[in-house]
Image: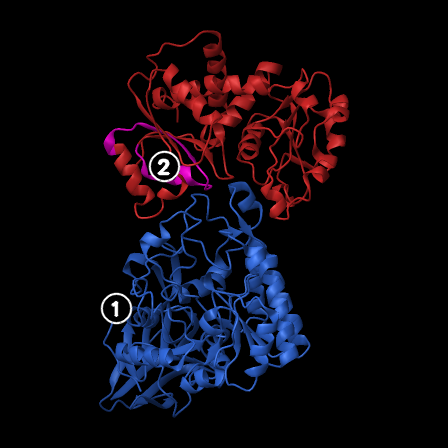
Amino acid sequence: MHRSKRSLLDIDSLTREEIELIIRRSAEFRESAPSRSLLAGVPVLNLFFEASTRTATSFTLAEQRVGADVISFAPGTSSLGKGETIADTALTLRAIGVCVIVVRHNESGFATRLAESFDGHVINAGDGTHAHPTQALLDLATLHAEFGRFEGLRVAIVGDILHSRVARSNIVGMKMLGIDVTLVGPPTLLPDAFAAKGLHIERDFDAVLPRVDAVMMLRIQRERIAASLLPALADYTIGYQLHAQRLRILPSHAIVLHPGPYNRGVELTDDALADPRSRYEAQVHNGVYVRMAALDLLVNAAGAVA
Amino acid sequence: MRVLIRGGRVIDPSRGLDAVRDVAIDGGIVRGVAEHVEERGHEVIDATGCIVAPGFIDMHVHLREPGATHKETIATGTAAAVAGGFTAVACMPNTNPAIDTPAVIAEIEQRAAAAGFARVYPVGAITRNREGKEIAPFHELATAGAVAFSDDGSTVMNPRVLRNAALYARDVRGPFISHCLDDELHGDAVMNEGPQSVRLGLLGSPGLAEDIVVARDLLIAADTRKRWHVAHVSTANAVEIVRWARSRGTTVTCEVTPHHLLLGDDLFVDYHARAKVAPPLRGPDDAAALRAAVRDGVIDAFASDHAPHTAEEKAQLLSVAPVGFSGLEIAVGAYAEALPDLPLERFVALLSTNPAKILGVEGGTLATGVRADVTIFAERPWTVDASAFYSKGKNTPFDGRRFTRRVVATVVGGRLAYHVERGIIERLAYA
């Protein structure tokens, strides 16, 4: 099918200029609410096959604030892929009149496959362990709000990189923007295969901490123990938890990011959450504005950019 | 009926023959290969400018019958075979029911004879219902016509079961063919593990999942002295392990597929399953090692692992779409594309003489008195069009690819089964 509409499948669906534009616009929206006519009457479907509280709420709010007609549907993970094909679903939704699909699915590539058959805009709200571009955008917006620049910033992403769509999208985006990225984690969760140009891989968290501008802590899930990727969580914390002692070697100007939901006492402690350098709330707050700006760019500036 | 294959360059590795010759066939039997054969009521096949070779044998195909005839039938699969230049195929036992009783073998042979395109050699299961638990009735299966044994599609994970099977079947004709992927290391992987899987966020299967089973199986082969064949080797390590086993006297052969020789794990960017296969397409270093292993003789046979599925099945999400794709009709072009510098005699040996020897079946030679199974091919550029396949499985990651070597004609039992300009000629009842 010939597709004329742009989608946001991963950060590299955007140019560097567009990322900067979204972040600039999100800052403007944060200062003063935009007109509700930006997406007035545009039917936007939130299609969350995988449960989500923060992302679904954030998208819904963003859509309402730009005046879209919001429909939300949580079909459950297994209802698609059997019987009706992805292409069938895409055609049906388009025929109904849906213009934008915000989709989350537990399979990597789902948004890509949907976009291939949907003659409208697809926004990936998280696909498996692949990508979560609006999360990366809000992380970037938070960094920009803090430092006013990207070029040359040093950011460490710590933890379960292998299973993290947030890490993948941030790696792509941060590299595009000239941020110096260091990945930190044990080899089971950060395989050597991540080695790539312009990306540092470190196993020693304490060696990395003193020289970063931001540290992003990723959620650790208990399933990793059953999968023999991790021993008891207490063991993980020895190497990779952000706790009081490590906060002492984190530079005073640096910030702590977490995509949430966090596991208190696992990847970070209460000290880290209470630390004035923590930007967890700012991240969540920025999410709404970034999503408003992304919707606006995709739907309204489709003709203006390549 | 008399057939004369006129003026082709005859390459017969079984006799070290490489010369322009006429091939005379009568009553389905090769009557002679000579510089000039007088035409006396022969049907003439002009092979000028072509290579004439002993019939190609694809020792690894899935015909899906019985049990999954929506994907392929013995008739459509063998039609695809002759269209791909294959006069015979060995069909894997992952059917439903599995090929673990003489009755299933009889059914397959009867259907193959009725279809009458290519010869079909059933491969029996190693364990009942390919479950890896109880060993199969090897004597019964061999007597019924099984040419080899394999649980292909599944690995016999229990080494005690595999060792006992190999011991019990040691004196039964036909090698064990192992499909090597450790269930635990492979898991639910959809592609090769490496920089590509990591970048795409897809679950990867490490080369180790294959290597570890190849090593285990060849140690069991050495221990039991059962003749062994490793299916679809796909890693540099697997090749080295075969080389090592052979160097210490283990009787082992191995095969390689067109896709592992030519394609890599960079075909998943669009998250489609068209290149999903087991073992998975590997990285460029592995493919290069496989090509080198064909050149230096470690690899004995080309085999397509023809694994047809419907378009709907392959269009599913990567996690649920089945592994494999059609191979018979692209194989000859793809092998030549992967190894353009391979001497023709070796090319023919890998496709006919060696598979015949490994399976212990007639063929692989144009010696006087043998069944007249002949493959005629030429350097004639063509473009793969999966929609035009005779196979029901109209998907291949090679679709649209341009190849230079092409099958011109396929002769089974002295009758023209396929000609590139005329397609499938007729259904041939063969003995």
Front residue of B32 and B194: B194
- Report x, y in % for residue B240: 64, 66
Q: In the figure, residue A218 lies in which quadrant?
A: top right
**Chain part drawn in magenta:** A95-119
Determine which of the numbered discs, if any, sits on residue B102 in the image.
Answer: none
User: Which residue is at 27% across, 33% downward?
Assistant: A94
Q: Which chain is blue?
A: B
Q: Are marks 2 and 1 on the same chain?
A: no
Q: Residue furthest top?
A: A32
Q: Chain for mark 2?
A: A
Q: Which residue is mark 2?
A: A75
User: What amino acid does circle 2 point to?
Assistant: Pro
Q: Which residue is mark 1?
A: B421
User: Which residue is at 33% across, 88% downward?
Assistant: B24
The colour style of the image is by chain
Asked whether the beta carbons under mark 2 and mark 1 sit within 8 Å of each other, the answer is: no
Crowding at dot 1, Cα within 10 Å, few <14 / some 14-19 / many 20+, comes out as few
Q: Of circles 2 and 1, which is in front?
A: 2
Front residue of A256 and A297: A256
Q: Chain for mark 1?
A: B
- Report x, y in % for residue A64: 37, 17
Q: Which chain is red?
A: A
- Report x, y in % for residue B144: 40, 85
- Res. A1 visible in picture: no
Taking B380 as reference, is A60 above or below it?
A: above
User: What amino acid does circle 1 point to?
Assistant: Glu
- Report x, y in % for residue B19: 43, 82
